[in-house]
Structures are given as structure tokens and as C-alpha cells.
Image: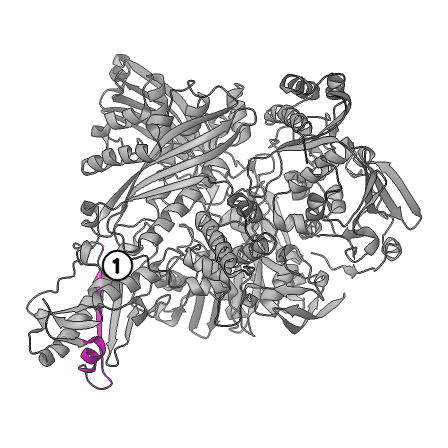
Amino acid sequence: MARITELEVNGTRRHLDADSDRTLLSVLRDDLSLTGVKYGCGEGQCAACTVLVDGAPAKSCLTKVGTVAGKRIVTIEGLAPAETLHPVQEAFLEADAMQCGWCTPGMILGAVALLASSPNPTDAEIATGLNGHICRCGTYPRIVRAIRLAAKRAAKKGVHA
Amino acid sequence: MQNFEYANPASLQQATALLAAKWGETDVLAGGTDLLSLMKEEIHTPKRVVNIKSIPELAGIRKAGAQVHIGALVTMDELAGSGDVPHALAAAAAGVPSPQIRHMGTVGGDLCQRPRCWYFRQGHGLLATKDGKPLIPNGENQYHAIFGGGPAYFVSASSLGPALIALNARIKLVSAKGSRELPVKEFFIQPKDDATREIALRPDEILTEIIVPAATHSSTYEVRQREALDWPLATASVALSMKGNTVAAARIVMGHVAPTPWESAAAAKALVGKPVNEETAQAAGKAAVAGAHPLSHNAYKVQLAKVAVKRALLDAVQARA
Amino acid sequence: MANTPDYSWPPMETRQVMGQNIKRLDGPQKSAGRAKYTSDFTRKDLLFAAYQTSPYAHARVTKVDTTPAERMPGVKAVQVVSPAGTEVQWEGTEIVAVAAVTEEIATEAVGKIKVEYEVLPHLVREDDLTKAGTHVKAAGEKTVGDPEQAFQQAEVTSDGHYGIPVVTHCCLETHGQVIEWRGDHVNCWPSTQDVTRYAGTLAPNLKVPVANIDVRMDYVGGGFGSKFAPDSWGEVCARLSQKAGGAPVKLFLDRATEQLIAGNRPSAYAKIKLGGKKDGTITAWQSESWATGGVTGGGSPPLPYIIANIPNQRQNHSAVSVNCGPQRAWRAPNNQQASYLTCCAIEDFAAKAALDPLEVFKTNLNLYAPEARRATYAWQLDKAAELAEWKQLWKLRGQGSKGAVKRGLGIGFNAWAGMGHNSQCRAIIHADGSVEIEIGTQDLGTGTRTIITQVAAETFGLPVGAVGLTIGSNQLPPDSASGGSTTVGGVSASTRKASVNALAKLYEAAAPALGVEPAQLEARGGKIQVKGGGKSLTWAEACRKIGGGGSISETGANDSRNPGGLIAAGASGIQIADVSVDTETGVVKVNRYVAVQDCGLIINPRLAESQVYGAIIMGISTALFEQRVMDEQTGRMLNADMEFYKLAGISDIGDIVVHMDIRPENDKRGVIGLGEPPAIAICAAIGNAVANAIGVRVPRIPMTPDHVLDTLDGRAV
């Protein structure tokens, strides 16, 4: 069985030793202690396991770690330097877009990916862009507000959110 | 999950050499959205998984004259965003309602995915039997077939299949022994026994590309309840060639209502020589479901299929930039 | 001290911190992805555990052969949960568990264990009573007044049948725990709604003194009533740890098992007949209802809901025992079912009488119990109607728009107790001015951390940043389970009392320096000052008077049997759904959902509203999408996953309008509790809105296209 001994995660080369057929979710959480990414369903239906692979949102519970060797992986922990928050994280905080917080890391990464390709999304585009992210606590209206806020602030600064 | 070998070929030739002649020995991995679940449930227990994601011959959309060649690894996202593919196909790809799935899911994966039938996924086989007795006729068949007459009652889960058939597209299949092309319609099979697969793909073949002719008036309409991430309850894809503003020829194909995408010649015939309007689209819809045989809990799908045909037709004649 | 301190809340208009929209204090951790939930526990010596469970709904275990697992490298412990001879009563029952050095090894090893069963007959569906045979147990008839005569004399009678299915909690963090059992000491990190009492429930099973069990939990990914106890897996996890030489073991259910055995909300089916006058007055109620909560039957919704004083009633209820996972408390147990059944019957009665249901709900206010809440309901009905634009939008059934898309409005009501659970708080003021609050409670995402801090800060006249808070451990002053919407009442009262008590001691220390009696002091704007203006010390200066290296440490308690004036029971609400139904496809969309909710004193409006939004969205999800699908042929749940057990997503919810009833008379009642009341009426309101839109009652929740189209086309649902 092929093994994966190196992964680029959050801008750093991480050394590990994992079967290439293990899920990226399991490797990130159990081998690299990056527990921000969550197991919700294990079948790609809730998006709590979302991470960014080369900038695009991917469901780590359905991704074999062997298929992402050599790609840029970003987890919630790597969105912003330590002790700081990414503008989307700030916006989620500002809009109180969370309750239990389980879906939050996946939502935030999904939002970052959305804003990267669609810096000024309509509410409908926000909804489509985050379809598939389940929040059982029911914070969706504030999530939409958070993303609108992040987009507006980025536009003001003339940067990408 | 059983232990298996994981292969990462760099070319099509290397990949086909790795595939076995029998089902159950090897499996192809592309986006992975389906294979991983199948393996976790031990519905698929391959000894070798062949990852084809790095094979350059399988990527990309390229125009060749009036046809578009779409590689098996093209994602739903790429397909939805491509200005070169007919509207019915782009709409079918865009309809896959989750950005991650649109990004990870591939054309080949969509066409080759196994059914979502919950009896199949619980290990009862394609014909869904337990101790020789069929489970679907007296069971929870609200998501199952209204056409085909059994013994298979699962519905084809392919988003692109109906559109490709309506568009007269072809599929290319490659093995170590050579290659062949099929009309997409022949790719889908209604199994009459448990040993037959629901697609014409042989165990040692890889689906490499689809070839799609140009189309002027085409569309796909999907009925789904939940926007979040849901399988459609019924869909219809239509492609029309118009003479002025009447229909010269039509192909009308319904999805998620039978073990294969289900074409209605009667619906197409009902439109020839006529304009497309509310009345004729409605009549075509009615003709499309005339042969339906619903089960105990899915009569509502007859209505949904009828409406999907009507709405796809009305959308197909909308002006598009 | 001569007098008991005055604990009462500061008047609404003087509050500095309470009543403010302070941002959720654990927000930064959650947003940063740094919040550590129990299932995030990592340690070098951590073992992972997995289950093999029964695929049969009813069977006897005849053989369990664990040798294939015992032999696997990396396996550290095996625990048989259901040995040979055990009667399995539902699919998903745990048979055996394995702990190993990785999750993959544990899963593989437990899968290799050979289990044999003798399969027994099962019943897994309760919706058709004629098929349930001896599984049905009638509870006996209840009558009030003379229903026979009342129906005979009724000017209008209506009847219908209604059904609401079993749904699951579907917490995103599944059930589980990490337990380390070394010698006679046990460390537990559970995913729970009850940090304080977890140890007490676990102890007898392990035969370890409660005092030897430490419980810690900082974050939990959802509970909704299903995570009150250690459960069988808590004990199994502990035993695996003990067998593995005391290594910590992480045991969490996978999603399928979670759906099967970690709890569900009972169903309810009923045939209901109402009788009354042409003016909409209801005089008679007759219901035959049945329900299941699993093998033990269970599940009896209180009928008629809220309009309990209908003068003539006949009720028959039966419980059906099915071979399915057992019920657990689901956010406002029994109330969704009762509200749905009752409100649907009222709406159908109104339609039969060709009356506006809003008027019928109002006409019958004198039947509502308790009497004290009637005026509130009256006000709320009008307020909700105003926000929903009822007068402009509501039409009699069949008189709406002509096209394929039909619009309709429907009403639902809710009632809940709340109050406050037993809670103790310790407030500590150090000589250096720092402040600590300690309570052995938990924050489920409800904002408990934040509101505790706000209460303390308000009391001390400090900003929230000056108050440190520790929760989430059973080594702290004991609290209770977060259930029944009793947390905010319990913790706010105990925190208020502890803080007032600590402040009283600070006044004693500071008073001499200000030359007044302690009773003349107040804490405001970071100062300890003489009431009415005049001399003051800064908070830091006042604390220095405590004396070098010293602290004040005082406790305060909320006793639920003796709540005093800080908390109250009794919340009510009215909700109105505005839906559009595409009658060609049966797809129901929520246009707007209005909730008017009475809630007592609100400590943090934004967090309170968050609860209401969340409750409504959960309700919309159940009204439109959720149902447990059981296959009678195989005895199995067909949708023990998140593909076909469908939850509402971001595009599925429509525009939600929340109006918190914070009129001063409500504030004066004190803190009540808000987690559950707004979660009750959604199926009622949406079911009624659909009936109004399409002109005919869709008898079954959820409002899926098949249920809607079957109804429109005259097929049985």
C-alpha cells in the first residue's frame, strides 16, 4: 500500500506516515491534530469536513489523502496567522453566525472559497455557494449576513475577502 | 473496508493495463464521491483501486468542428461554466446543487455512478431482493421507477445522462484491447438479473470522453424539493431542431424515473410540426408519461415527469445570449 | 448581616451590560476553529474504539466470537456488550466494541468479530394500526362533560386525520466520550448536556465513588435533548479503558448508528373531530390518537394543546411498541405533536365554518389554559397577524390565486414552562481587582457563557472583559442538565446571588475608606461609590481594601423549588407561516415565517433571537423534509444517513421574522428560558398554511411533494 509521508498544510510541509487510502479528514484530525475540520456524516452530505485544496472547497471525508499529495491544503487553523482572524472569521463573529460551532469551520472555508470566485455575491449566490453546508442549530440567516458583511468590507478595502 | 492496493497511473495506457476482466476485482477512482461510500458499505470490495485523476488524456473540453469533446475528468463546475456546451448539458451540470460536489464530481463519475436506491445501498443488489423476494414493490418505493416494468426498480442517478441522450452524444470507452464508441443511450442498461450492471462499461474499460454535437434549442428541468443538496425527484432534458418557430425534430428524455434515462418517442412525435407553447408542451408531457406504471408510493412521480417535460420544453425555446 | 441582600434585577432602564448585545464570548474560539470538542480530544496514548451493531430489528444473539479481533495487532481491548442470549430489540443495538491504536484498526477489527443471531419477528411501523396487532396498548378513554350531546347539538363539526412521524435529533457531533479509567480514578470528557451529573449517573455502573470521577467538557456539537446521560456507551468506553491498562479511549457513534440508537422524537397520529357553533366557538373535542416512542411504546402528546378547557371531550390514545431505537427528549418533548394535532384541527374547523382561523383562535381564548396567559396570547395573535400581513394576504380556502402556485397562511401556538434549574455559582473577587465566576454548567451554543458573564459584570459594575468565567467541569459548584429551557434561569439567578453576596463583602471592606455604611454603596461604571453621587473608589482601589493576597469568595444558589423573584415559568408564542405551493410539483416553499415569542427578561437580545431562529429553522426542517423511514420487510431504517434523512439547508428556509415580546410587563417577570418554546409550533403553522394554500388538508408531515400531490390527486397519504 502506498504511503503518504508529506503534505503541504497551511503553508507548512508536514511530515507524517499514512496509508494513501485513508481519508484526508482522518489524517488531518488524528495524525496532524488539526481538529478544526469535523466529522459530521462521513458521506459528503453535511460539509462539516470542508477544507480548501488548491483554493477550492473539498469534502475531506470523501478525499483520499493519496490524491492530495503535492496540493495546497488549507484548514480553518491556517486561514489567518496565529492570534489573528481572517476577515471572514471576523464577519462570522460580528454577525453571530454560530451557535454550537460545529459547522462553523466548514462554513467559513466554504465562504472563503465562494468570495474568492465571487467577490460580490447576491444573496441567491451566497445560498447556492453554501448549499450542502448543514447547520443543525439553524444559524443560516446570520451566516448570510456574515458573508455579505465580509464581501462589503473587502470591497471597501479593494481586496479579496 | 477491506485492504486493497492503490494504483496511480500516469497515462491511459498504464491505467487500462491495471484493470481486471471481471467486476469486483478492480475499480476506477476519479472524484471519489461515490466509490468511497460504496467501499465503506462493502458493496464494492475491489482488490485494486486505480486512480485516474492524473491522466492528462482524460481532462479538458475541446471543440472539433461542430462537436465538443469532453474528457471524463471534466468536473461539473467546468462543464457548467463552459460556453461551448449546449444549454441542456450545462444546465444539468449546474443543477448538481453543492459547490464541493460540482468541483469534485466528474463527467465520467456521473455517468458511471451506482444507483442511490436505499435497498441497493443496504446490500440487497440491483434488483433489491431478500431471500429471493423483491423488496421494492411492497416497500418504500417513493423514490423508485415509474417506467421499465421491473425487475429493476432503482432509478438512474446520472445528472448528465438524459441531456447527453437528448443531444445525440456519444461515449468513448477504452480498454487495453482497443476502443469503442457508443451512443449514450446504449450506455445505460436495464438489468434483468443481479449479475448485469446498469451500464455497458466493461470491467476492464475506462470511459474516456463524451462527444457532443452542437444544439440550438435544448434545456434540462429538474424537480427537487430540497435546495440544499438533494437528488432530483424527476428531470427532463430536451433538444429541439427548429424550422422557423415549429419543431422539426425533438428528443425528449426523462431522468430519475427509470433504471435508465427514459426517452419518449411519443412526446417527440407529438411536437413535430408544432410550435412550442404551454398547450403543446403540456400535451408532450402527457404523452411522455402515457406508458408509466407507478408503484404503490410513487404515483406522484408521473405528475413530476410530466411537468418536467413541459417546463424543459418551454425553457428550451427561450432566447439565450 | 441583619438583612438578606436584595438580589432583584436592576430596573430595565438602568442596565449597563444586561440587555446589551454582547458578542458571544466563545465566538473567537469557534470562529478560529480552536474550540475543542470532546471528539477533538488528542493525546499520544489515546485509543480509538468502534462498535459492531445488530443489523436486525429483533433477534437473539446466539454467538459472539471475538478471537479474530483479539489477535489483530494494535487492538488493546475488546468488550462484549450483548453476549449470547441477549435479545436485541432494535437495529443498531451495540453487540461488541473494540479499542485499538487507530480508528482504522478498531473499525477493521470489530468488523472481523463473528456474531450469530436467531432472527425474530419484528414490527417497525406504527402508522397503520391495523398492522400493529398485539403491539398496541390502549391507555383508556378520558371524557369530560358530555361529548355525545355536544356533537349532536353542534352547528358545525369538522373532522380530519393527521400524522407527524418519528424524527431524529441528528446532532452534528454524534454521541460519545473519551474516558480514562486508571486504578480507582476516572477522567471523563463526554459530549453532554449535563456536566454536573454525568459522574453521578456513571458511578454506580462502574462501582467507583462519584468523588473519583472527574468530568470536563468545553464544547458540545449539539444535543437538543438527547445527551443527558452517559448512556451504555459511556460505561463501555470506561471498561475498554480499564481493560487497556488505563489508556484513554475515544468512543463515538458513527452517523448511521447515531441515527438508529441515539434518540428520536415520538410520532403521533390522530383522527380528530371538533364540534362547535357557527361563530367559531369550539364546544366539543374527540380524538383517537396513537404514537410510538420505540419498544416501550411511550409518547403521549397533551391533547387538546393549550385549548384544554373545551367543555366536552372524549380522548382515546394508544401506544404502539416497535422494534426501533428508543425515544429521547427532543426540544420541547410532546409539544410539537400536540401543537400540530390541535392547531390542524382548529384550522380545519375554521375552514368548515368558513371562518378566518385567526378569529377562531381568538374567539376561543377563554378555553386556553392557563388563564393567566390569555391576554398575552390575544396580544400575540394580533402582533403576529400584523407582521405576517394576515389581513392583506389571507384568503378563504379555494379563493386564492388562480395560477399553479398557490399561497397560503397558517397559525400555530406554543406554551412552555421554563423557569430555572438548580444551580450554584461561586464568585471570587481578588485583591488585585480580578474577578472569577465558577459554575459547573455547559454552553450548548445557547450563549450560556456570555449571559453568565453579563450578569456578573452588571452586578459588579464592570465591563464583561473584566470577568473571568470557568464552566464545564464537575469540580465546580454544581449546576444541572441543560434541558427544559431551564439553564438561563438557573445560572443567571445563581450568578446574580453569588455576585451580590461577593459584592456585599467588598462593600464591607471598602466602606470604612469612604466613611459610610456598606448599605450606602453601589457598584457602577467601574467604581464603588456612595449612592446618589459623591465619594467613590475605583474598582481596583476598593479591591485593595480586601487586604494583601486575599480574596472574597461567595456562593449563590438557585433552588428551583424556591425561585424568588429572579426567574419565572410560563412562556407563550404565536407563529404564522406564509407558504407557496407549486401545485404542479407539490414543492412547498416558505415565503415568510413570523414568530412572536414571550420570553420574560432578556439578558442578551441577540443571543436570545439566535435561539428563536434556530428553533424555527429546526422546525421548518421537520415540517418540510424530515422523517425516519422504516422498511417493514427488513426491519431496517432506510435513511440512517444524511443523504435521505434530509435537513434544511441555507436555501430552504425563507424569510424569518422574529418579534421578541419584551414589553416591560414581561421583563418584570424575570428570566424564563427560550430554547424550546419557539421550537413547538412550526409543523402546525406550516401544515395549516399548506391546507389554506391548496384548499385541502395534507394529512401528513413532512410536506413533501409526494404527500402534497397524493392529497391533490385524491390518493391516500
Q: What is the x, y in percent for residue C444?
A: 40, 57
The furthest residue to the right: B177
Identify which residue, B10 or C538, lies in the foreground: C538
Q: Chain of mark 1?
A: C
| Amino acid type of the residue tagged 1 in the rendering | Met
B98 left or right, relative to A135: right
Count of marks, rendered view: 1
Label 1 crowd (10 A; few <14 / some 14-19 / many >=20): many
Kindly identify which residue carries mark 1: C18
Image coordinates of residue C244 in percent, x first then y, are 55, 71
Please report the residue visible at 38 percent of the width from the left and 61 percent of the height from the top: C198
Residue C317 is at least partly visible in this image: no
Q: Is residue B284 above or below residue C497?
A: above
**Is C553 one of the magenta-colored residues?**
yes
* In the image, residue C25 above or below residue C132: below
In the figure, residue C548 lies in which quadrant? bottom left
Is label 1 in a helix, a strand or a loop? loop
User: Visible in this render: residue A80?
Assistant: yes
Q: Position of residue C106 (x, y in %)?
A: 62, 63
Q: Position of residue B210 (x, y in %)?
A: 81, 42
| Closest to the observer, A108 or A136 | A108
Is residue C350 located in the magenta-colored stretch of the structure?
A: no
Relative to C236, say whether C388 is above or below.
above
Q: How is the image coloured?
A: one colour
Looking at the rendering, in which quadrant would you find the N terminus of chain C? bottom left
Over which residues does the magenta segment extend?
A: C538-560
- Residue B148: name its quadrant: top right
